Image (tube, coloured by chain):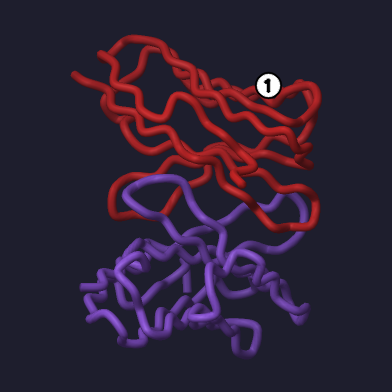
Chain colours: A red, B purple
């Protein structure tokens, strides 16, 4: 059973386009994180959100935590080739075991 | 060390052989995780160590998989009688184990079972 479902699974867009990645669950999380992973490396943390309804911005990336703390979204404005990678959401249900989503593979074409 | 170190980075083995994968976490991190990743997909939770507590082994796929963490630091993931479906990247991460749980990952050990 996959606690965190991400959509879309794959995304190929042109440089300059906008995109949104979704992370959905039926479970409530005390915190939710987004990571990006490049080939041959481990995932690297982008952001942590802890409050329902919270919105965080990191340059061209906007992260939102759902009001009920069951879902999250990642929006990228004016995507660049350097944004290419595997995006992973991850949730902590309060007892420290962190569960990862199914992943979204993003390719930004120059 | 400055980061999480995993070894070997690549391992090719024959079906039926045992393998050991090592993880050296960040000094002072009390929590240590093992995940498995197949074909660039999401991460599958395997096992979680937190301080001196009993580990959460709920993600281990079979009794061929085991892990230990000695002295609250280095961890070894052992796969006995490897099968082709065990081929994957095995990722280790550590964290402070409190607060918003930020995981720092190693680069992974890529296992190929022929």
Q: Is residue B104 above or below residue A110?
A: below
Q: SS for tag 1?
A: strand
The answer to whether residue A79 shows anywhere in this view is: yes
Residue B41: % across, % down: 40, 45
Residue B64: % across, % down: 49, 81
Return the residue nearer the eye: B15 or A34: B15
Return the residue nearer the eye: A9 or A51: A9
Residue shown at 27% from the left, 80% from the top: B15
The answer to whether residue B30 shows anywhere in this view is: no
Callout 1: few (<14), some (14-19), or many (20+) C-alpha neighbours within 10 Å? some
Q: Quadrant of residue A2?
A: top right
Residue shown at 45% from the left, 61% from the top: B36
Quick one: quadrant of the C terminus of chain A? top left
Residue shown at 53% from the left, 73% from the top: B62
Q: Quadrant of residue A96?
A: bottom right
Q: Residue furthest top?
A: A17
Q: Is residue A31 left or right of residue A20?
A: right
Q: Is residue A39 above or below residue A107?
A: below
Q: Is residue A89 above or below residue B99?
A: above
Q: Which residue is mark 1?
A: A55
Q: Quadrant of residue A63?
A: top right
Residue A62: % across, % down: 56, 20
Return the residue nearer the eye: B2 or B111: B111
Q: Is residue B3 above or below residue A98?
A: below
């Amino acid at each position: 059973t996959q606690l965190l479902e991400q959509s879309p699974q794959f995304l190929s867009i042109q440089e300059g386009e906008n995109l949104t990645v979704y992370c959905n669950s039926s479970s409530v999380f005390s915190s939710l994180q987004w990571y990006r992973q490049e080939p041959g490396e481990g995932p690297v943390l982008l952001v942590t959100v802890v409050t329902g309804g919270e919105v965080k911005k990191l340059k061209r990336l906007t992260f939102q935590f759902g009001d009920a703390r069951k879902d999250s979204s990642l929006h990228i404005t004016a995507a660049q080739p350097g944004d290419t990678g595997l995006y992973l959401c991850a949730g902590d249900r309060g007892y420290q075991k962190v569960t990862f989503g199914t992943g979204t593979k993003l390719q930004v074409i120059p | 060390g400055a980061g999480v170190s995993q070894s070997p980075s690549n391992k090719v083995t024959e079906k039926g052989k045992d393998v050991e994968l090592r993880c050296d976490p960040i000094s002072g991190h009390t929590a240590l995780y093992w995940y498995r990743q197949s074909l660039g997909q999401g991460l599958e939770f395997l096992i979680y160590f937190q301080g001196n507590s009993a580990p959460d082994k709920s993600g281990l796929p079979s009794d061929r998989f085991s892990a230990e963490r000695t002295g609250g630091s280095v961890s070894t993931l052992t796969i006995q009688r490897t099968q082709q479906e065990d081929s994957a990247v095995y990722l280790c991460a550590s964290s402070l184990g409190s607060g918003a749980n930020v995981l720092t990952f190693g680069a992974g050990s890529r296992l190929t079972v022929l």
